[in-house]
Image (cartoon, rainbow, N blue to C red):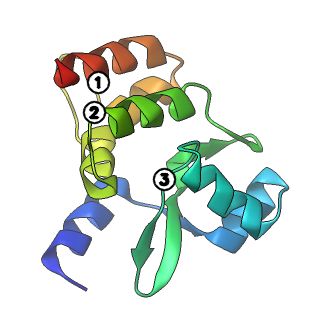
Amino acid sequence: MTENDRDIDTLVGDWLSVRDAAKALNVSPNRIKQFISDHKLLGIKRQGELSIPAAFIAEGDVIKGLPGTLTVLADCGFTTDEALRWLFTPDDTLPGAPIEAIRENRGTEVRRRAQAMAL
């Protein structure tokens, strides 16, 4: 595991395998991979296995506001690692990390900030 991987692990915390994410969302593992391709979820290879942050899923669904935010970040040119770091890094002006704000249904403000970074 590289230092970069450890940093992301520290920020993100809990991860789900593709199979676990599929089970949590009641879809096939192939559908999870499609969600990642469509920017509805984000996943990275960790120890040779594609993993998804557990914070992206709640109550059997992808958290509201996440897909739109991921699309904005992708449109801004963020790599997967950069997007994960941005989503999980605390921001005193929110307060909390952007992912926490999204989970608290404050995704509009998070997307505004992401769009502002593209300007």
Give the mark nearest the N terminus, 2 or 3: 3
Q: Do tag 2 and tag 1 residues touch (Cβ < 8 Å)?
A: yes
Q: Which residue matches tag 2?
A: 76
**Mark 2 vs mark 3, CA separation in Å:** 15 Å
Label 3 vs label 1: CA separation? Answer: 16 Å
- Is 117 located above or below residue 17 in the figure? above
Residue, disc 3:
42
Residue type at numbered disc 3: Leu
Q: SS class of the residue under badge 1?
A: helix
Q: Please provide percent x and percent y for residue 12.
A: 36, 55
Question: At 83% from the left edge and 57% from the top edge, which residue is drawn?
Answer: 27
Q: Regarding mark 2 in the picture, which secondary structure is present there? A: loop
Residue 23's quadrant in the figure? bottom right
The image quadrant that residue 29 belongs to is: bottom right
Q: Nearer the viewer, residue 36 or 14?
A: 36
Q: Position of residue 71 (x, y in %)?
A: 46, 34
Amino acid of disc 1: Ala
What residue is pinned by disc 1?
114
Amino acid of disc 2: Cys
Quadrant of the frame with the N terminus: bottom left
